[in-house]
Image: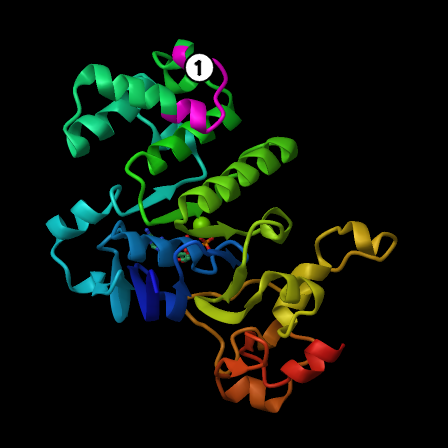
Amino acid sequence: MLLDVRDLRVEFRTRDGVARAVNGVSYAVAAGETLAVLGESGSGKSVTAQAVMGILDMPPGRISGGEVFFQGRDLLKLKEEQRRGIRGAEMAMIFQDALSALNPVLSVGTQLGEMFIVHRGMSRRRARERAVELMDRVGIPAAGDRVGDYPHQFSGGMRQRVMIAMALALEPALIIADEPTTALDVTVQAQVMDLLAELRRELGMGLILITHDLGVVADVADRIAVMYAGRIVETAPVRDLYRAPAHPYTRGLLDSVPRPDRKGRELYAIRGLPPNLLDIPPGCAFHPRCPLARDVCRTDEPPLFDAGEGRRSACYFWRETLGG
Ligand code: ADP
Ligand code: MG
């Protein structure tokens, strides 16, 4: 397994108490596999990724438990300088906002070239050539003419391609893309997603796609993990989950997105609010919002039940959910 996250826990010390942002997340990604991580804002998707990448804000953050095996090593046991060597070269991250992730005062060619100069010992001229090749590869038109341009001179979609090029430069084994298309127009979103999927296939890397929008990842992900209140509540092959969810929260998410195959059906909104991480409800964290909640849900935290065919659901009533 390329990446194997086990029972990861992250908390933040805040003025009002301890926010339990990640509460025992386990997921794995194989080489060449795409895992989508889905959940509402605040469910712990980014914090989990930051802990994996080693870029968590500490303090106020603290990893209070778990293991992160990457190519066999537990990253949480490595020294910061060892982790720095892994970041960029072996695992890279793509963020939502390219404008703030890129350096505004350096041309994109300089920023891309720097990767090759620092990590690969290339000459300035050779690094420039590689930068143009890479820009070309990620679909930036007239790459040779644009290599000297600055980030603000590119459109949002093209800037996102530049950031993808940065992430790919050293051919990492794993890429984590955190809401990579959230800031883009719908058509550009699809283009950038297609590019990521194509590069993943071609280079055989593992890909984690973080999103709050299932529509965006349904076509490109293999598996999907749904997060709620810092836990994974359901994981399944993406097609199966899309067809028939095994957790009421996933069902709520699906029913609240417009879908071409469900034209005419009324859109549904999950009632209530996301949980306060300073005070997560006992039992199943979703129970106050759940249409199926019964007594056991209010007292006993459900484990991830094996719901067959590669799916797991943290719902006592997963059979009922699947069937409904
Ligand atoms: P998302 O699923 O939207 O990516 P995040 O993983 O970014 O959610 O955040 C989960 C929760 O962790 C937030 O709602 C917040 O309570 C807490 N959190 C994240 N970053 C910080 C921080 N730097 N300081 C304090 N709390 C934080
Ligand atoms: Mg996030």
Q: Where's the N terminus, which quadrant?
A: bottom left
Label 1: how many Cα within 10 Å (few below 14, some 14–19, many 20+): few
Q: Of helix, strand and loop, which one carries label 1?
A: helix
| Residue at 29% in and 52% down | 53
Q: Is residue 69 above or below residue 105?
A: below
Q: Is residue 304 above or below residue 51?
A: below
Q: Nearer the viewer, residue 134 or 284?
A: 134
| Residue at 27% in and 17% down | 128
Q: Residue 193: percent from the left, percent from the top? A: 55, 40
Q: Is residue 163 left or right of residue 74?
A: right
Look at the image and say whether residue 135 sits in the magenta stretch. Answer: yes
Q: Residue 307: percent from the left, percent from the top? A: 59, 81
Q: Amino acid at mark 1?
A: Gln
Extreme-right residue of the structure: 264
Q: Residue 41: percent from the left, percent from the top? A: 51, 53
Colour scheme employed for the rendering of this structure: rainbow
Q: Residue 194: percent from the left, percent from the top? A: 56, 39
Q: Is residue 159 left or right of residue 254?
A: left
Q: Is residue 187 left or right of residue 13?
A: right
Picture mark count: 1
Q: Where's the C terminus, which quadrant?
A: bottom right
Q: Where are the magenta residues, as a range?
A: 134-144
Q: Is residue 39 above or below residue 324?
A: above
Q: Is mark 1 within 8 Å of ligand 2?
A: no
| Residue at 59% in and 31% down | 188
Q: Nearer the viewer, residue 64 or 83?
A: 83
Identify residue for label 1: 153
Q: Is residue 76 left or right of residue 261?
A: left
| Residue at 53% in and 64% down | 226
Can the viewer see residue 17? no
Can the viewer see residue 116? yes
